[in-house]
Image (spheres, grey):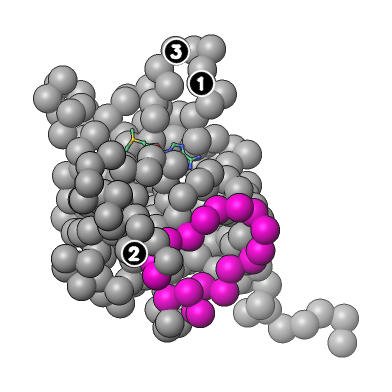
Amino acid sequence: MTAGQADALQRLWPKWGLDIDGQRVIDLGEMFGNTNPVVLEIGFGMGEATAQMAAADRRTNVLAVDVHTPGQGTLLNLAEQSGLSNIRVGNGDAIILLREMLAPDSLGGLRVYFPDPWPKKRHHKRRLIQAEFLDLAATRLKPGAIVHCATDWEPYAEQMLEVLTAHPDFENTQADGGFAPRPDFRPLTRFEGQGLDKGHVVNDLLFRRVQHGDQDQDQPPTGV
Ligand SMILES: C[S@@+](CC[C@H](N)C(=O)[O-])C[C@H]1O[C@@H](n2cnc3c(N)ncnc32)[C@H](O)[C@@H]1O
């Protein structure tokens, strides 16, 4: 950790940091001081892309979570330098955050950019994007919320597309049911740059949390 990262953690953690201890359900409105939508970013790395996206859209709150402490220091520094009051930085496991600390229907979106690819077959079960994770995420996302994933590891991209497509709580925003064109609003991330240098192909996925029972609500009540 650099001196700058350590300094940022010491000064800014009490103001903008969140310890993911699984001990309480967070009031997101209280945490950000407003009722703007909150997007959860899992695994922000050094946080450059996180800060750029937060600067480009200050009316969206970003709860950025990682276990990598130096990156947390960097992101806090970036947030301070750019006056970004719409970023909070979580330290710990995103699964515990989702399961124990976020209320149902509390998130306006989810971003997972270049999650660890775990290329070896015996490690595939460690990949974040799988059906069990989506079951949990779906409960915390508001209907209509967008899940945005990106990866430079093609077999993982195929897995993401397969599990998201199969999940009843998500629908693909792409009419052809495939990968999304790279959106302008997603900056190049550090891991993405490394992947591109190796000649990897990057795929984005944009899925929407489905509102179940829409049609039913439009129907007149039966049996009366
Ligand atoms: C390959 S890096 C990508 C970082 C960044 N998104 C980028 O594109 O440069 C994946 C990041 O996810 C973080 N991570 C992995 N599992 C996590 C979890 N369960 N909760 C929070 N962060 C996690 C790792 O610490 C790492 O920083």
What is the span of residues highlighted in magenta in the rendered image?
15-32
Residue annotated with mark 2: 12
Classify mark 2: residues with Cα within 10 Å, few (<14), some (14-19) or many (20+): some
Residue annotated with mark 3: 120
Q: Quadrant of residue 202?
A: top left
Q: What amino acid is labelled 1 in the image? A: His
Picture quarter with ligand 1 = top left
- Residue 8, position in %: x, y? 28, 57
Q: Which mark is residue 124?
A: 1
Q: Nearer the viewer, mark 2 or mark 3?
A: 2
| 23 in magenta | yes
In the image, is 209 to the left or to the right of 41? right
Q: Is residue 154 visible?
A: yes
Is 109 included in the stretch rendered in magenta?
no
Q: Secondary structure at mark 1?
A: helix
| Quadrant of the rendered image containing residue 219 | bottom right
Verify CB contact (< 8 Å) between mark 3 and mark 1.
Answer: yes
